[in-house]
Image (spheres, rainbow, N blue to C red):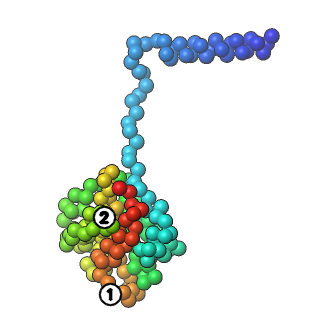
Amino acid sequence: MTGKRVWVGAAALCAVVTLGVAGCGDGESDETPTTPEAAQPWDPCSLSDEALQAATLDPATEGPGFAAEPPGWKTCGWKTIDQIGIKMSATATVPVEQFRNDPRNFDFRDVTVGDRPAFTYVTEIGKPDDFCHLVVPFESGGVLNMQVSHSVFTKDPTPMCEWAVQVGTAVADELPR
């Protein structure tokens, strides 16, 4: 009998809780409204080895893009055989205007990577011959901002903005739309 009493007591408790939640009140919820979750950025480290190799990047050199990842961004970095460094940073919330309106950025050039509009720019931080950035907007919001730089050991004379467009074109099919 004791087992039956426990079961009946549990059933009665469930009924009271259910009535208390569903049957009382004036129809308004006492729950605190939830805010939508912030859009999560695409992770550049998710690029396939095939796409990286097509971009002449060595998948074995993959690592964090920067020592400290800014909030709302995902970053990843690689190197080419010629010691050219690529850092890709993606965000779901920053518009392209942030890059175009930054007074430290200049020499904007509209380009196409794959079938997508993009642009390159250089920044006053670093030498223009040593660094170039490529921005690819996502239709869903946000952007990919790629930084291309070469080390003092690089013997490749290709301008960094040309490298940026080559790499961007090679990985364009795996970027979010």
Q: In the image, which disc is placed on residue 62? A: none
Total numbered labels placed on residues in the image: 2
Specify the quadrant of the image occupied by residue 51. bottom left
Q: In the structure shown, which secondary structural element does the residue marked by tag 1 occupy?
A: loop
Can I make out residue 62 in this image?
A: no
- Mark 1 or mark 2: which is in front? 2
Residue 47 image offset from top left, x and y in percent: 46, 64
Q: Could you say which is closer to the camera, residue 102 or residue 85?
A: 85
Q: In the structure shown, which secondary structural element does the residue marked by tag 2 occupy?
A: loop
Q: Which residue: 73% across, 15% down? A: 6
Task: Work out which residue is located at the far bottom of the displayed protein and give it.
Answer: 155
N-terminal of the two: label 1 or label 2? Answer: 2
Name the residue beneath numbered marker 2.
115
Q: Which residue: 49% across, 70% down? A: 50
Can I make out residue 83 in this image?
A: yes
Q: Is disc 1 in contact with disc 2, using a CB cutoff of under 8 Å?
A: no
Rendered view: 123 above or below 117? below
Specify the quadrant of the image occupied by residue 111. bottom left
Name the residue beneath numbered marker 1.
157
**The N terminus: image quadrant:** top right
Q: Could you classify mark 1 by the number of other residues whose Cα lies within 10 Å: few (under 14), some (14-19), or many (20 or more)?
A: few
**The C terminus: image quadrant:** bottom left
Q: Which residue: 44% across, 65% down? A: 76
Q: Name the amino acid type tagged 1.
A: Pro
Q: Name the amino acid type tagged 2.
A: Asp
Residue 53 image offset from top left, x and y in percent: 47, 74
Q: Which residue: 61% across, 16% down? A: 14
Rendered view: 28 above or below 158? above
